Image: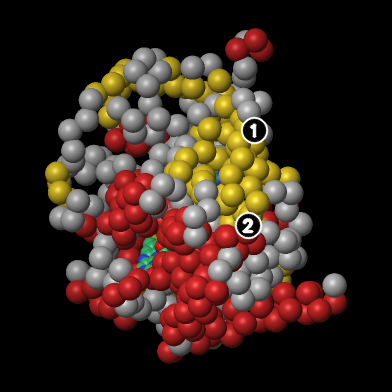
Amino acid sequence: MRIEEHPILGSLPKAQTVWIEVDGKRIPARAGEPIAAALLAAGIRVFRTTHRRGEPRGLFCGVGRCTDCVMTVDGVPNVRTCVTPVRDGMKIETQRGLGRWPEQK
Amino acid sequence: MAGAEVTDIAVVGGGPAGLSAALAARQTGAEVVVVDENSAPGGQLRKQIHKFFGSKEHHAGQRGFRIAEELAAACRDRGVELWTDALAYGIFDHTLGIVRRGTAFTLTARAIVLATGASENALAFPGWTLPGVMGAGAAQTFINLHRVLPGRRVLMVGAGNVGLIVSYQLLQAGAEVLGVVEAAPRIGGYAVHAAKIRRAGVPIWTRHTVLRADGRGQLEEVTIAALDENGRPIPGSERAFAVDMLCLAVGLTPLTELAWQAGCRFEYSALLGGHVPLHSEDMETTVPGLFVAGDVAGVEEASTALEEGRLAGLAAAAYAGHGSPALEKEKAAARERLLALRSGPFGSGRRHAYEEIVRGWLRWSGAR
Ligand SMILES: Cc1cc2nc3c(=O)[nH]c(=O)nc-3n(C[C@H](O)[C@H](O)[C@H](O)COP(=O)(O)OP(=O)(O)OC[C@H]3O[C@@H](n4cnc5c(N)ncnc54)[C@H](O)[C@@H]3O)c2cc1C
Ligand code: FES
């Protein structure tokens, strides 16, 4: 959920809308924000599943330290979505396990 | 490698400690570069929308993010180079390995100040890995910096300052905070912060813990329980809450990877948050020309981070050949102010812990 009005920070500043594709679905994002912010704003909370047990993972540290939030971005696996800004037309996939590099597909 | 950069003083981390170190070093005429991995300088301060405590000279009464803006502006005015989006991934003697926007290069300095801050601790219990369970700092970053609420109904674990402040900020962001769970018999944070969330109707349950988190695919329910005198859950006291967010505010640990890699000697201090690099009264580690300041030198507050930064910046400048009698006086004044900050019921414990680290450094230096 986007915080449109805030008692201290005021109204959400205007930002350019860019579009990203998440598992084939187009969702809007604010230019410059991290991928994870756009996903959470769209109600997407599961970013990947683990290698052995297929357990779900999502945002955990929010500052690029824990790697719980990694996804496959434009074909590159293990991208930390909490610190990687969106780009128009970016293709994001829920990552299964360790992910696959393009040449392995 | 794109190249090899050279400067007098390199500062890793652009939080209050790093920016203050940079300003102090720059004032001696030294050339200073600050390296920070974020898109803007300020460190923790960027996420702090509440008014800070302390004295006037430490920006008391000002909101954290404003303090960050002021420090960064002062740095720019005075010719400190601020490199954002720049991660220092390694340290090799007096050379830092840096990755900035996909390019790797090195930065060599006469003296280096590590001001990398701290990272949040986690807490393990069944279900703690479910999406929806996260650090309180993660929640704070997303609501205050990115303006997105990661959940709507929240439980907070930990009634230290971080847990209390982030609970209040979650309310301000429009979330429903069901309560704060604290294992200790007493609230750890300042009474004002606790009073604020209590006034807003948020209960604080001391002597309670999280038993488990459950949900299909993501967090749906959290079970808490009361603890007996021995810290064991009391059977029958379990309570379950339907929540989509559980925040963990269970302490910070100094972010010391670079100091370890540089070969610094450490000592463990529970009060300062974990292993802390031994350092002198001038904040110099056991590696000559390598200084530390702020939370990496022991988790404290922004005010102490500013003063430690100042001290480290001045001492680093002196090491790099920019020393003077006036500079020595300023260092002494910064030490005096640190002493004053580390007094009173909350500060004196930290003062002893800090002195223990300096004693460790003196023992090391005597045995050399
Ligand atoms: C919720 C909360 C509320 C607080 N409230 C108060 C308060 O009211 N009053 C008060 O005095 N203090 C308060 N504090 C504490 C204060 O914010 C910290 O003590 C202070 O920010 C520490 O400063 P620092 O410069 O050491 O670290 P930080 O502010 O953490 O800055 C370190 C910076 O270094 C960067 N970095 C780390 N490693 C690298 C690397 N390898 N390469 C590049 N960059 C790197 C980090 O990303 C970060 O930007 C609060 C803290 C929190 C979490
Ligand atoms: S949530 Fe920890 S790295 Fe992104």
Give me the disc on residue B110: none
Write the residue at 59% across / 78% down: B354
What type is the residue that disc 1 sits on?
Ala
The image quadrant of residue B240 is bottom left
Give me the disc on residue B320: 2
Chain containing mark 1 = B
On-image quarter of the C terminus of chain B: bottom right
Residue B47: x and y in percent read: 34, 54
Q: Secondary structure at mark 1?
A: strand
What type is the residue that disc 2 sits on?
Ala
Q: Is residue B263 left or right of residue B63?
A: right
The image quadrant of residue B192 is bottom left
Write the residue at 50% across / 73% down: B326
Q: Is residue B205 positioned above or below A16 on the image?
A: below
Give me the disc on residue B4: 1
Q: Residues within 10 Å of mark 1 (few under 14, many from 20)?
A: few
Q: Is residue B64 left or right of residue B121?
A: left
Q: Count all numbered tags in the image, as a single digit.
A: 2
Residue B15: x and y in percent read: 44, 55
